[in-house]
Image: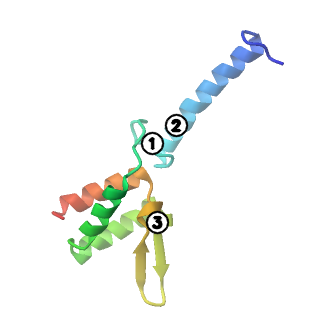
């Protein structure tokens, strides 16, 4: 159809490359897709990372936990399951984006947990 080396093929290759670069930049700016602000990929947290994070949440104060929930609500609302009848919030660590996870873990660790 568009043979390798043809004008249309080369144009399509150039456009595809530009699209990928711009899309990666857009994902990094909006904290989606597993990209950091620098554009480098962030590794998915391991099960051990998630377990350690969950255990650390029991060691921080109520105020610090409130900040964690507020941060997650702003950065990754899909990770929170709210039960307004009982005034509870459940954090689903599997739904936290890698970038938001790293930021929240860094905050929890800075709290001394």
Query: Could you tell me which residue is drawn at 26 percent across and 58 percent down?
Result: 107
Q: Residue furthest left?
A: 112
Label disc, if present, on residue 79 of the rendered structure: 3
Q: Residues within 10 Å of mark 2 (few under 14, many from 20)?
A: many
Spatial CA span between label 3 and label 2: 23 Å
Secondary structure category for the residue under label 2: helix
Pick whichever of labels 3 and 2 is earlier in the sequence.
Answer: 2
Spatial CA span between label 1 and label 3: 18 Å
* Vertical comparison of 87 with 13: above or below: below
Residue beneath disc 1: 35
Query: Could you tell me residue 18's position as x and y percent?
Result: 59, 26
Query: Could you tell me which residue is drawn at 58 percent across and 32 percent down?
Result: 20
Secondary structure category for the residue under label 1: loop
Query: Could you tell me residue 79's position as x and y percent?
Result: 46, 66
Query: Could you tell me which residue is drawn at 20 percent across and 72 percent down?
Result: 59
Q: Residue furthest front?
A: 48
CB atoms of marks 2 and 1 within 8 Å: yes
> In which quarter of the view is residue 89 placed?
bottom left
């Amino acid at each position: 159809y568009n043979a390798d080396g043809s004008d249309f093929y080369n144009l399509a290759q150039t456009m595809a490359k530009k699209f990928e670069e711009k899309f990666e930049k857009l994902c990094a700016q909006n904290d989606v897709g597993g990209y950091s602000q620098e554009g480098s990929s962030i590794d998915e947290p391991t099960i051990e990372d998630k377990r350690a994070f969950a255990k650390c949440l029991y060691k921080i104060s109520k105020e610090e936990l409130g900040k964690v929930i507020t941060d997650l609500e702003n950065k990754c609302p899909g990770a929170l399951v709210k039960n307004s009848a009982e005034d509870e919030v459940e954090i689903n660590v599997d739904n936290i984006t890698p970038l938001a996870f790293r930021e929240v873990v860094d905050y929890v660790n800075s709290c001394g947990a």
